[in-house]
Image (spheres, rainbow, N blue to C red):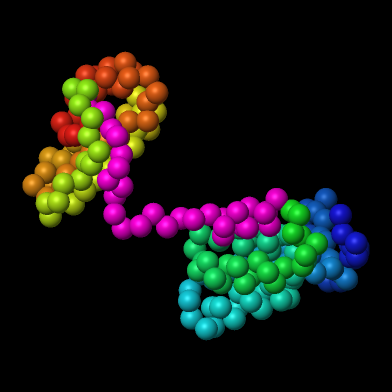
Amino acid sequence: MCKHPGTTQLTPLQGFKSKNPEEIVLELDHVNSQTEAAFYHGNFVTGKTDADIKHNADLVLKYPKSIYLLNTLNVSKGDLDEKQLARLLSGFDKSLANSSVYKNIQNFLSYNNDTGSQFPADLKLKQPDQKIISSILNQDNKFKLVVFRASWCLPCRKEIPQIKSLQANYGNSLSIYSISIDKDEAHWQNALKEESMPWQQ
């Protein structure tokens, strides 16, 4: 619902002859900015040049009340620099601040996604032989692949042949580790027997 809705009027187009007499042609007149933004299909560009940043800012400046454009920003949020994303969000009209899309972007910006460069060394992980380890990544120069999986996860089970292929092709330069998120240890142990994964579990 808009406070200042536009008007939609059916206007016959002169000189237009349709092959299908039931075909309807719409011409939108006096369209408000919210509706115009939806028809314009403006997209945010993800480059970092001055021209890209200006394009994005101008888009919000032109359609600050458009929930459609705000939703487009939400879809693009992962591809934009966080500072630019925050500036673009602040450019939207405050009437949109209570929308779920606006809050979704706010939550995305407030989430601390800085995982650091080091794999955590204070984990307590149980191996199939019941031994507990706190660090799984040794210091050799191999590439490391850490796979989180579960016995009940069908896509996880389906990717096992691909991981086996990776190990066969790159075994000398690749270390593979699987970490299960199973809550039932018996299910985890049974899956290990069924799948015969020849890397650290």
Q: Relative to the observer, which residue lies in front, 154 or 107?
A: 107
Q: Relative to the observer, which residue lies in front, 166 or 85?
A: 85
At x 83%, y 71%, the residue is 15
Q: Residue furthest bottom?
A: 50
Count of all numbered marks drawn on residues in the image: 0
Point out residue 23 in the picture as x, y percentages from the top left corner.
80, 54
Quadrant where the image shows the C terminus: top left
At x 46%, y 55%, the residue is 113
Q: Residue furthest front?
A: 122
At x 84%, y 68%, the residue is 32
Magenta stretch: give its range.
Answer: 100-128
Left-right relation of 41 to 195: right
Quadrant where the image shows the N terminus: bottom right
Left-right relation of 108 to 156: right
Q: Is residue 64 above or below residue 156?
A: below
Residue 101 counted in the magenta span: yes
Left-right relation of 40 to 128: right
Q: Is residue 85 above or below residue 195?
A: below
Is residue 106 among the parts visible in the rendering? Answer: yes
Residue 117 counted in the magenta span: yes
Is residue 42 among the parts visible in the rendering? Answer: no
Point out residue 156 in the picture as x, y percentages from the top left corner.
34, 32
Point out residue 36 in the picture as x, y percentages from the top left corner.
77, 67
At x 23%, y 30%, the residue is 132
Point out residue 92 in the picture as x, y percentages from the top left corner.
72, 68
Quarter holding residue 115: bottom left
Quarter holding residue 159: top left
